Image: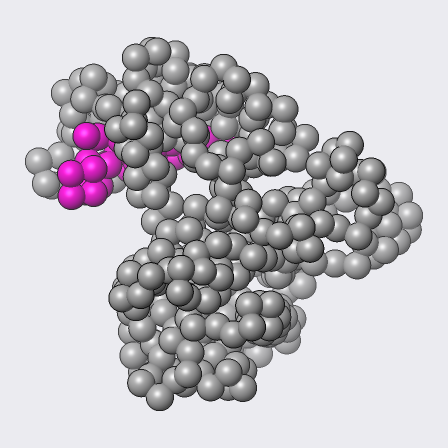
């Protein structure tokens, strides 16, 4: 069974083709600047006949997601990058969906009612959900009705949060009228690595208290108790939580109102400031990339050092609070682009959690980068600490396979 996994963004279309027999990656790529036909391009890594074929920024006119799908079709079935003879070899398509709201608490087979439901949630994730719908409709147009399409929701794993964790201190009527509450994101990643953590530990996830730290340009931290999420750092949108690459993270709402009044900013302008001009980029004034920030801090840039210290402080704070919320913790997992590669940040975070009895093997920790998996805690550590690369696409493929097999 071959599953095509799709992550459609507002101007991009990422794809992976996975052979579920052995869960082997056959091809992956990204179509970028979709809707800008003059400048759109595609980058990919395919494995025809076991050989790696790479290409970067190949011009490919794409005026919309439908045209992007035809580019993907050509890449998969034609030329040097060809990995299958025909699209009929694709059994099903799995789609990542950022916001399922309270309508979807598990992965589902896509039909018109599902598309309508996802569209009804566009106000909660206007850029993401609309793009996902466009990707789904383009995929259905290409593959036809006979190829099953499955939606896998980013927030579904967080649907087990209790009301005291997901409700905001607003008048209750706004929850009733607009469903304003914490939903959480990166759920597919948190689900994958928490399950992998239990597997590596050789224990049922139902017996464990795990804190998963998905750290990247967008970051979130989640408390998983007995296999269920009891709290997560992102909220109504991915803006909440710890400081991120270009997002503020948690902030006093009065600060938002104050800036809007002083700078005469519209809601849309403020949204841009909070989501795209703040965070590590805003504090450092330099970059949102941790590699740039680390280098600048080492060279004496005080604002870069401040930005990184803020990030480390907030990671420690969330881990500490979630340990309290779960009345203990058995394991901590680092994942995501920063979590998997910033070994110095992992070490500093663990040093500041010494009150939990955490002790790590720092030389070994420094070796776990670029997709390496391992346990960095020592035998004497009271909490086990892991670096576990995430694989959201594989989890989407697994959910898609399971739903198709149940038909």
Residue 203, magenta (yes or no):
no
Instruction: Indicate the position of residue 385 as horizontal and vertical percent values.
Output: 39, 73
Look at the image and give the residue range highlighted in magenta. Answer: 1-30
Which quadrant is home to the C terminus?
Answer: top left
Instruction: Indicate the position of residue 257 as horizontal and vertical percent values.
Output: 86, 50
- Residue placed farthest to the front in the image? 207
394 with respect to 230 (left or right): left
- Residue placed farthest to the left in the image? 49
Q: Is residue 179 above or below residue 250?
A: above
The picture quadrant where one finds residue 396 is: top left
151 with respect to 48 (left or right): right
The residue located at (68%, 30%) in the rendering is 123
The residue located at (27%, 66%) in the rendering is 202
Q: Is residue 56 above or below residue 244?
A: above
Instruction: Indicate the position of residue 181 as horizontal and vertical percent values.
Output: 69, 44
The residue located at (53%, 33%) in the rendering is 104
User: In the rendered picture of this protein, how many numbered marks are placed on residues?
Assistant: 0
Q: Is residue 93 above or below residue 212?
A: above
């Amino acid at each position: 069974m071959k599953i095509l996994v799709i992550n459609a963004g507002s101007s991009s279309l990422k794809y992976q083709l996975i052979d579920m027999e052995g869960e082997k990656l056959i091809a992956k790529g990204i179509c970028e600047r979709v809707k800008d036909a003059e400048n759109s391009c595609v980058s990919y890594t395919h494995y025809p006949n076991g050989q790696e074929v790479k290409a970067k920024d190949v011009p490919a006119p794409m005026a919309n997601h439908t045209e992007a799908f035809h580019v993907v079709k050509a890449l998969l079935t034609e030329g040097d990058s060809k990995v299958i003879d025909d699209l009929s070899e694709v059994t099903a398509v799995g789609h990542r969906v950022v916001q399922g709201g309270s309508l979807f608490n598990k992965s589902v087979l896509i039909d018109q009612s599902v598309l309508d439901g996802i569209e009804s949630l566009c106000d909660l994730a206007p850029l993401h959900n609309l793009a996902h719908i466009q990707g789904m409709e383009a995929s259905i147009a290409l593959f036809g009705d006979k190829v099953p399409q499955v939606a896998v929701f980013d927030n579904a794993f967080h649907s087990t949060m209790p009301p005291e964790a997901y409700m905001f201190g607003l008048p209750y009527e706004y929850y009733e009228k607009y469903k304003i509450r914490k939903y959480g994101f990166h759920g597919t990643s948190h689900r994958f690595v928490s399950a992998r953590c239990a597997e590596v530990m050789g224990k049922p996830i139902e017996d464990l208290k795990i804190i998963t730290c998905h750290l990247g340009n967008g970051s979130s931290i989640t408390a998983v108790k007995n296999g269920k999420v009891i709290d997560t750092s992102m909220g109504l949108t991915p803006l909440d939580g710890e400081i991120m690459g270009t997002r503020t993270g948690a902030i006093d709402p009065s600060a938002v109102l104050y800036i809007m009044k002083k700078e005469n900013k519209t809601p849309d302008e403020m949204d841009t400031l909070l989501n795209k001009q703040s965070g590590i980029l805003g504090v450092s004034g330099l970059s949102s990339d941790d590699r740039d920030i680390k280098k600048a801090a080492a060279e004496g840039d005080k604002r870069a050092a401040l930005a990184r210290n803020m990030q480390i402080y907030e990671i420690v704070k969330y881990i500490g609070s979630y340990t309290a919320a779960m009345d203990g913790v058995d394991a901590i997992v680092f994942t995501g682009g920063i979590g998997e590669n910033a070994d110095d940040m992992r070490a500093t975070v663990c040093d500041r959690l010494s009150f939990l009895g955490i002790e790590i093997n720092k030389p070994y920790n420094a070796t776990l980068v670029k997709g390496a998996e391992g346990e960095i805690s020592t035998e004497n550590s009271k909490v086990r600490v892991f670096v576990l690369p995430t694989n959201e696409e594989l989890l989407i493929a697994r959910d898609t396979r399971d739903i198709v097999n149940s038909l």
